[in-house]
Amino acid sequence: LAAVVAALLVLLLILRTCLARTWARGARAGSAASIAACANPQCVRCVRYRAVAAQAQRRLSQLPCPPAVAQAVVSMKAGDPPISTVVGQHPTLLRMNLPAARWHDAAFAHVEETLIRPDTFEAIDHELGELLKVLPSGEPDLRTERAEALWSRNDTPSGSWRTYYFISQGVRQARQARQCPRTAAAISSLSDLMGDNVFGNAFFSRMAPGTTVEPHCGPTNLRVRCHLGLRTPPGYTLTLAEGVRDGKPVGAQDRTWSRQQCLFFDDSFIHFVTAPHKGADRIVLIVDLWHPALTAADRAALDTLFSPT
């Protein structure tokens, strides 16, 4: 009888575990139903996640890794987002057990100090101005025409959201670096730059009035995203939320941009941008940085596992 009772207890424990996992995945799927995705065929977050996961797992077998990194990569399942126990945090591809916080301003004060230093900020601001310059006649000059071709357009339900990449999913963009050499140099000088794997990006982000950026999450909690304010007209708001219910954010925390100041946030949390109906474009420099809890060994292993080549 004791053996039967013990067996029943084991079965109940297994059933409870399975039900808990099913509920968690269902909750994650319900939340994901409110999270936007794009159709860009090169996007790691929305389209290329299966290939990225498979490549990392193949490389893992050939590389000695810190245990926490190896465990996270082994647990990746193509098309099956990792389950997070942190409210509002839903990385779509890779999750490590790292301290979770929406905002990381204090941890990256040294980055802000570098980017807002007068000579650095003025150089970035000047190069951006050259990209946007038009002649008095209203016609773009030749430099602007060449630069215009390097701006990418993001999917948005309305308005215009354009990006000018210095690093795109770990790949350095040589033409943009030639157009804006001092901006590219300032980005490369950052010791915490995530610049050599598919999760790392650096770019000018230009958003027009009337633009809708729906709630979405980044692909991983390994990074912290820096926004340096360059053109910061009123009316634009960045919101990080615990979730979305009936089209409205739950547990929302709002921030606004200021010129020559930085915002640092974990973009694996649900976030979106609200734009005014009219006014000027908002332009920021966005740079992806390593999560402060990752060690040098963690970073090196992740760069190898998720190298863009």
Image (cartoon, rainbow, N blue to C red):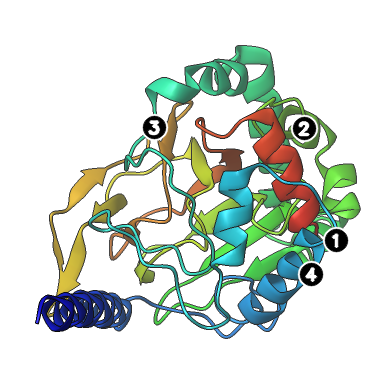
Q: Tell which tag, 4 or 1, sits nearer the viewer.
A: 4
Residue under pointer 1: 146
Return the residue found at the far front: 1
* Callout 2 amino acid: Ser
- Can you give x and y, in whole percent of width and height, for residue 45 in the image? 56, 71
* Callout 3 amino acid: His
On the image, which quarter does residue 301 sit in? top right
Element type at mark 4: helix
Element type at mark 2: helix
Q: Tell which tag, 2 or 4, sits nearer the viewer.
A: 4
Tell which circle, 4 or 1, labels the residue nearer the N-terminal end. Answer: 4
Residue drawn at the location 68% of the way across and 15% of the way down? 119
Q: Tell which tag, 1 or 3, sits nearer the viewer.
A: 3
Residue under pointer 4: 58
For the residues labelled 4 and 1, the Cα–Cα distance comes to: 40 Å
For the residues labelled 2 and 1, the Cα–Cα distance comes to: 23 Å
Give me the disc on residue 188: 2
Residue under pointer 3: 104
